[in-house]
Structures are given as structure tokens and as C-alpha cells.
């Protein structure tokens, strides 16, 4: 259902644009008042498909041996993505705006790299600390080009701090490190 809401939200500007174009043309070519109902034009501008975005970004980063799925529903706590290092799964929430999917994939991919380094969820969390684990994943995500870095944005509001030097170094190490898939 969240999909339906999102997709119609995406379609609305396109329809508005078509209507606007019609209104601009109308004075010079007074067409017969044809109700603008027809079919929603096949000229849908570069539509964003969540599954295609997921595949495209993972094609660039690699899946790291994880099963990546777009969940059928929003995730508990309204999280946009959840990586289970022990289960080797990544779930992306159904309500992530399509254009943010690459950012969410970048962040979760960083978690898979963290997990690859430490092996299990508990060891990874222990190594980083839960909060730093998220911040470093966001720093890596940001270095990978993300426009959406919720933990950094939240913390900057609170403390004015973006990534620290240590976090950036840690994030660069995760990005530069061989991936689980490339090492087999
Ligand atoms: Zn995270």
C-alpha cells in the first residue's frame, strides 16, 4: 500500500505538468474541450523503480553474500533498512522513497562490510559500539555519495559534529577493504 501511495505521489507532478502544458498551449490552439482523462500518458518521465534502483546500486557495490530484499511493509521502528549480519540478510523498507534507495543501500552495504570484518553481529557491535557503528556506516554511505545520512544529520543538529577524523578513516577502511564477495 505504501507503494501505491508513493507511486501516485510521483505521478502527480507529471500529471500536473501535462495539465500545465495543455493550459499554455490552449490560447494559441483552441482545441475542442477534450476532458484530460485519456490514459495517463506513456510519457512518464524517468520513473524510479525501487527494485531496479536496488539492483542497479548493488550491481556497483556487490551484494557481499547477503540476500537483499525490499520488504513488503515498513520496517519496525520505521527504519529504512535493517542488516542482519548473522543471517546475512538486508531488508529495505517498503516506504523508502525511491530516490533514497541508493543512499539506504550504501549505508546497509557499509554494515555488511563491518560484519565481514568482525564476523558476527555481537562482535561487530562490540567493536564499534552501537552508536559509532551507525555513524561510521553513515560516514561510509556519505563517502559513497549518499544524499541521505540520517544519523549524521541528527547528530549534527545536536552537536554540530559531522564525521570525525577517526570515523572517516574507519569508513574509508570499510570501503577500501576487499568485499565478502570478492574474497569468496
Ligand atoms: Zn544502520
Image (spheres, grey):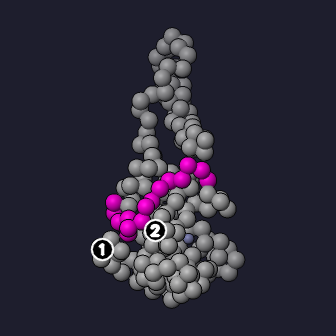
Query: Does label 2 point to a residue whose CB lies under 8 Å from ligand 1?
Result: no
Residue 107 shows in this picture: no
Q: Quadrant of the C terminus?
A: bottom left
Q: Is residue 55 above or below residue 149?
A: above
In the rendered image, residue 11, in percent from the top left (x then y), is placed at: 53, 37
The 10 Å Cα crowd at callout 1, few under 14, some 14 to 19, many 20 or more, is: few
> Which residue position holds label 1?
184
- Residue at 55%, 68% in the rendered image: 149
Identify which residue is drawn at 60% across, 72% down. 151
Residue 77 position within the rendered picture, expressed as x and y whole percent measured from the top left: 67, 62
Which residue is at the far front?
A: 87
Q: The magenta stretch spans which residues? A: 59-74
Neighbour tally class for label 2: few under 14, some 14-19, many 20 plus, Cα within 10 Å: some
The answer to whether residue 105 is above or below residue 23 is below
Is residue 159 visible in the rendered image? The answer is yes
* 83 is higher (above) or lower (below) than 22: below
Amino acid at each position: 500500500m505504501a507503494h501505491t501511495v508513493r507511486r501516485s505521489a510521483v505521478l502527480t507532478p507529471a500529471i500536473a505538468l501535462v495539465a500545465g502544458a495543455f493550459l499554455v498551449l490552449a490560447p494559441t490552439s483552441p482545441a475542442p474541450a477534450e476532458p484530460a482523462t485519456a490514459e495517463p500518458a506513456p510519457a512518464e518521465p524517468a520513473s524510479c523503480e525501487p527494485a531496479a534502483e536496488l539492483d542497479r546500486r548493488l550491481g556497483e557495490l556487490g551484494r557481499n553474500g547477503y540476500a537483499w530484499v525490499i520488504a513488503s511493509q515498513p520496517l519496525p521502528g520505521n527504519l529504512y533498512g535493517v542488516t542482519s549480519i548473522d543471517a546475512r540478510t538486508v531488508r529495505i523498507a517498503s516506504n523508502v522513497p525511491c530516490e533514497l534507495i541508493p543512499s539506504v543501500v550504501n549505508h546497509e552495504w557499509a554494515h555488511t562490510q563491518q560484519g565481514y570484518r568482525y564476523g558476527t553481529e555481537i562482535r561487530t557491535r562490540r567493536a564499534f559500539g552501537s552508536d559509532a557503528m551507525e555513524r561510521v556506516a553513515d560516514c561510509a554511505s556519505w563517502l559513497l555519495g549518499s544524499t541521505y545520512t540520517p544519523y549524521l544529520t541528527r547528530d549534527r543538529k545536536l552537536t554540530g559534529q559531522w564525521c570525525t577524523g577517526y570515523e572517516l578513516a574507519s569508513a574509508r577502511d570499510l570501503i577500501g577493504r576487499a568485499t565478502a564477495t570478492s574474497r569468496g
